[in-house]
Image: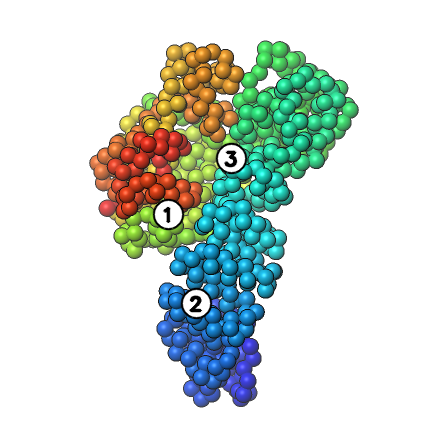
Amino acid sequence: MPQSPKKLSKTHTNQFLLATKLHQKGELKEAINLYQKILITAPNFQVCLNLAAALIDLRQSNEAIEYIDQAIKIDPKNPESYFLYGNALLQLSLLDAAIAGFDIAIKINPSYVSAHHNKALALESQGKFPLAIESYQMAAQLNDLDPEVHQNCGLAFCKLGKYAEAISYFCKSLDITKENKIYWSNFSVCLGKINNPNLLKDLSPYILDLINKKTSAIRPSIISKIAIHALEESELIQKFIQITSQVPTEKDILDIVRGLSTLPLFKKLLTLAPIADLRYEKSLRTLRRIFLKSDSVFVQDPNVLEFSTLLAQQCFINEFVYFELPEEGHLIEQLEAEISLAVEDGDIPPHKIATLATYRPLHSYPWSLKLAKTPSPNILTDMIRVQVLECHEELTIRNTIRPLTSVNNPTSKLVQLQYEENPYPRWISAHGYAEQIRIRDLFSQMHLVPEFANLPYSKSPNILIAGCGTGQHAILSATRFLNAKVTAIDLSLSSLCYATRKTRELGLKNITYFQGDLLELDALEDQFDIVESVGVLHHLLNPEEGLRNLVRRLKTGGLIHLGLYSEIARKDISLTRKLIKDKNLSNSQSDIQILRNSIINNSHLEFNKLQSVMIHNDFFSTSECRDLLFHVQEHCFNLIQVENLLKVCGLTFLGFEFLDESFKEPYRAQMLDNTEYLLTHWHEFELQNTSFFSGMYQFWAIKV
């Protein structure tokens, strides 16, 4: 905050105060004019500094230096002048000189926190991360309540790959302020790089807060895995996992459920995303079966009812992917009949509803709305909301979604039918961006081909998401790009209803959903600045035809973001799909459960080869497992084929998109410099690192 000037007349003082207010409001040009007017007749140290600061804010550092020199002549021993001098030179990328300026300020005032901090920024720009960290740490010692200092120190440790140290500083910044989205974003990205459970065991409260924020830079499925790691050392979790190795008594069950009820992170985990951990799956299946077979455990402890409602939410999220024994099927039929009668009488036992909800979606029953309107314990509220009310809300949304194109292609109709049955993927919490960017910022952020960075990209981009599914991708783009207008299309009306409900829930207004087929996009007259289609083209009978359709909707100079399956990384998937065909398995719920159970239990020698399939998160929910292993249409590519596909469609490869740029380090360490944008070299790399693109190839290209 600018200080009051000394030795100014009353008129000049009033002008100075007005200029300061303009400066604080961001009206920089007006403030600068007023500061300059004062200096014409009244040279003054503080006016010079304020003027210099305003010019730096306006990124006019060369002009700022002139006024800093004037201030130094007036008062050569004031550290603020040298601090601003360092800031101006830092902005001009004259890093050695900037550091020298900060050092003078620190020599005059060793407790000058901002000078230590900005010196660290300059050292970091030089790649001198250890020295930068020393300066950040000095600033932190001087002012332990400045969250930005802790945050930037954490980022510097991240760049050195020292994630445990980084996390400790991120936590300090979050202890000071929990409302900064960028701080949570940096924390979550760093969390995703920690694989050692010992480093996570004290972070449960922060991870829980991160989940409750509902938006994050990383997917909920990844946060779910992090939460599992964070809980790994808990004795209560170990007892829970070991339940499958014994025949548990009712006392064992009660002890375990009571223990788990004291772990807020575990309880939240059940409602976040499908839990992609076989140990958890087996234990949850065991508990579900015990709850179905025995009423008495509910009577003995109310924690059991709460746990069963959370388990019901997990089962709903994973779309009841868990295998059922024949005896369970018979008991479920009895339970359904019993509840149907109870609903008519208006006396519905809560524990029976909760138990049924762990096996079947409640909204599928004709009595579900009556259940929702019948007074019930608060403990059932969230379960009924998720399994009944939200599903009926989606039914009301169906009539509001306009068809953009017809769906005539036979393959498109088959794909549409698959996704109508299960909106894909079902998700609870969105992951979004803490900071919005312009299109040109994407080049520095993703390290795309720099020569295209300065084209005249739109400041209000019109974006097409072709194959938006349940809306995650559309929400991601809508929160990523500044002033974006997003048009999202999909074949599946069920998926679009889900997407619309979740988008409304998040309060986003810049996404419009339509039902349509990307093979019919000539019906759409709009041209787009960005087209995104991830995980879609490889499900077409002719991917090239689909890509040509997308390119026709893309402006010249527009960007396209694509995601395609790798045939090298998906060899295990191809083996599984062959076995499915040989076994004549359909993509029904029951056949998916049968196949999963056979793979999990390695029931025959032929399934032994398929164990690697279980590393995929998609293995742990019905719609995603169907998409992974049972899809009605699928192509896989290698990068030579991708290069040819881009070429024939008039596109130039710009670079891969990864969750974090550090994912490229293995390539940079192994391959030649200056080959990062050559797909032939990436193909050579993938042949030696076959699981590198196990998700899919995700990349950006430009229409030239």
679 to 580, vertically: above or below? below
User: Which of the image's four quarters has the N terminus?
Assistant: bottom right
Comparing labels 3 and 2, the label whose residue is closer to the camera: 2
Tell me which colouring the rendered structure shows.
Answer: rainbow
Q: Relative to residue 345, is residue 71 drawn left or right?
A: left
Q: In the drawing, what numbered circle is on residue 99?
A: 2
Q: State the separation of the CA atoms marked 3 and 2.
A: 43 Å
Q: Is mark 1 on a helix, strand or loop?
A: helix
Q: Which of 680 and 26 is in front in this view?
A: 680
**Residue 704 at x, y = what percent?**
23, 46
Q: Relative to residue 231, is residue 580 drawn left or right?
A: left
Is residue 688 in view? yes
Residue at 37% from the left image edge and 64% from the top image edge: 93
324 to 492, vertically: above or below? above
Residue type at mark 1 is Met
The residue carrying mark 1 is 446
92 to 549, vertically: above or below? below
Q: Is mark 2 on a helix, strand or loop?
A: helix
Q: Which of 359 and 225 is in front in this view?
A: 225
The residue carrying mark 3 is 221
Sequence-wise, the earlier of marks 1 and 2 is: 2
**Residue 470 at x, y = what percent?**
47, 34
CB of mark 1 within 8 Å of CB of mark 3? no
Residue 100 occupies quadrant:
bottom left
Residue type at mark 2 is Ile
Sequence-wise, the earlier of marks 3 and 2 is: 2
